[in-house]
Image (cartoon, rainbow, N blue to C red):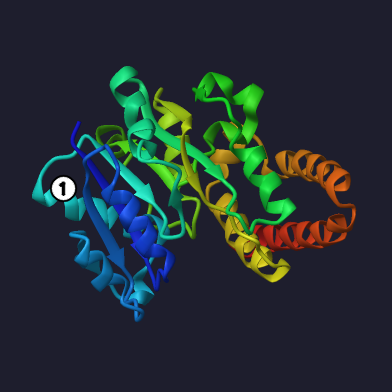
Amino acid sequence: MDCGLIIPTLNAGAQFRTLLEQLAAQTLPTRKLIVDSESTDGTAELAKSFGVEVLSIPRKSFNHGATRQLALEHMLKTAPLDVIIFLTQDVLLRDNESLAALVKIFAEDKSVGLSYGRQLPHKDATNEAKFLRAFNYPPESQLRSLDDKNRCGLKTAFASNSFAAYRVEALQSVGGFPNHVPLSEDMYVAAKMLLRGLKIYYAASAQVYHSHNYTAAQEFRRYVQIGKFHAQEPWIRETFGSAEGAGKKFVLMKLAALAKKNPLDCAGAIFRDAAKFLGYRIGRLIA
């Protein structure tokens, strides 16, 4: 398979060198491109020093879906690709087989359009961040189709472009990444693929380190955008179920887990969950 790899960047910081070193050591050969939004910390120059192609765009033009689509189309101008891999600048690869494990399914099952891997918490992750990673990224691989929507609900269409790979033909068949949604372009494409009869694969053996210790304010801003997304794309909730239902289950499980580790964590978690809920509802209203 001919594979490409794309990373959107903006002032990626010192850790980005480690990621570039890890990419150079991967057993899976890939063509590599970063699409950089006017970094001022030498991100683009560092990538070039590792032989990575750089596509520069104005910072104000960045869009989660449109920018990834632009980068893919840029790569396809040079040569065709069978698979395109997306990472975010803040991940670290678990081992030298991370990318190979992520794309392996495409040779084994032609019905799979999207594969995403397991995200492990960074060393500095809070108990809450660790729980989120364990909840969304279990140790067992999963193959999901539209038939699983009654069992899995909204998580049927869950995926993350922090560490995901797409069969290019399948991605193109659903129109590529959207340019009209604030974020969640990965869920949008996953849902479109499922409706076309394609499958989503969660590759638990493909692993990266990726987590965030968000503040309540950061959670609020994120969930305003998520609320806008669900308001703009009501067909996703109509097909797979509401985000509120899945959110309630998650919150109860999280609080129970945090109470066992450190009860003091519960107060902060409740505050952040309230910020999420408020942000989501406001996003739904103002979309």
Q: Is residue 176 in view?
A: no
Reading the image, the residue beneath label 1 is 76
Q: Is residue 92 in view?
A: yes
**Residue at 72% across, 67% down:** 216
Task: Assess disc 1: are there few (<14), some (14-19) or many (≥20) residues with their C-alpha within 10 Å of its C-alpha.
Answer: few
- Residue 273's image quarter? bottom right
Furthest-left residue in this view:
78
> Which quarter of the image is occupied by the C terminus?
bottom right
Residue type marked 1: Leu
| Most foreground residue, 159 or 26 | 26
**Residue at 65% across, 61% down:** 213
- Residue 196's image quarter? top left
> Which quarter of the image is occupied by the N terminus?
top left
| Most foreground residue, 153 or 28 | 28
Q: With 191 as the anchor, is 101 left or right in this view?
A: left
**Residue at 75% across, 41% down:** 250
**Residue 265 x, y percent position in the rendering:** 83, 57
